[in-house]
Amino acid sequence: MQDAIRLTQEESDRLRALRLAKPARQPRSSDRRSMGERVADLVALTVGSWRFIIIQSLLLALWILLNITAWARNWDPYPFILLNLVLSFQVAYAAPIVMMSQNRQAEIDRRNAAHDYQINIKAELEIELLHTKIDAMREQEIARLTEVIEALSARLSPPAA
């Protein structure tokens, strides 16, 4: 028969603390974002969309077309230095803002992972405890069945003369 797995005192204390904390019932993370975080998330959401890519591509094509055909006073001739400057400014501001949003999301993911870890630890300890209880019940059942079989054997066996 397999030895029953028993929880150590440390595991029992941890399980008791997790039962009191009820980690599965707590919300994962609250949405208390500062104004800067909300702006960073909005910029990341906008810049990281197909809509932005399509509009940006159309604007770039229009800029180049208007300057090549000199239809609108040719304000940025062929090497498109002004266009390069505008795009450089856009990248210089958009990249750090997107990184701020990603860092915030990574922090949220870390908190959620820690929360999930606490729930998993509690589940593991609860399962070990249930295994212990089931093993104890099985041992009691086997002992009781053994007693019943011995009693039946005693009744069925012929008396010694």
Image: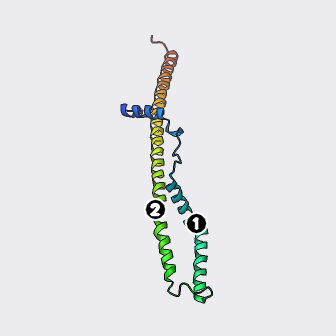
The extreme right residue here reads 71
- Judge whether residue 6 can be spotted in this image: no
Q: In the rendered image of this protein, does residue 150 appear above or below residue 58? A: above
Give the quarter of the figure containing the C terminus.
top left
Residue 58 in view, yes or no:
yes
Q: Is residue 161 above or below residue 58?
A: above
Q: Name the kind of residue labelled 1 in the image.
A: Ser
Q: Kindly indicate the quadrant of the structure image that contains residue 46.
A: bottom right
Residue 30 falls left or right of residue 15: right
- Asked whether 7 or 151 is in front, the reply is 7
Residue 147 place in picture, x, y as percent? 48, 20
Camera-side residue of 28 and 161: 28
> Is label 1 in a helix, a strand or a loop?
loop
Q: Circle 2 sits on which residue?
A: 99
Asked whether 156 or 145 is in front, the reply is 145
SS at circle 2: helix
Which quadrant holds the N terminus? Answer: top left
Q: Residue at x 36, y 33 (%)?
A: 10
Task: Confirm or deny contact between disc 1 and disc 2 (CB under 8 A).
Answer: no
Of label 1 and label 2, which has the lower sequence position?
1
Q: CA distance from mark 1 to mark 2?
A: 16 Å
Q: Residue at x 50, y 25 (%)?
A: 141
User: Which dot marks residue 103?
Assistant: none
Q: Position of residue 98 (x, y in %)?
A: 49, 63
Q: Residue furthest bottom?
A: 69
Q: Decide: few, some or many residues near mark 2? Use Cα within 10 Å; few <14, some 14-19, many ≥20.
A: some
Tell me the residue that label 1 is attached to: 49
> Residue at point 44% right, 40% down?
121
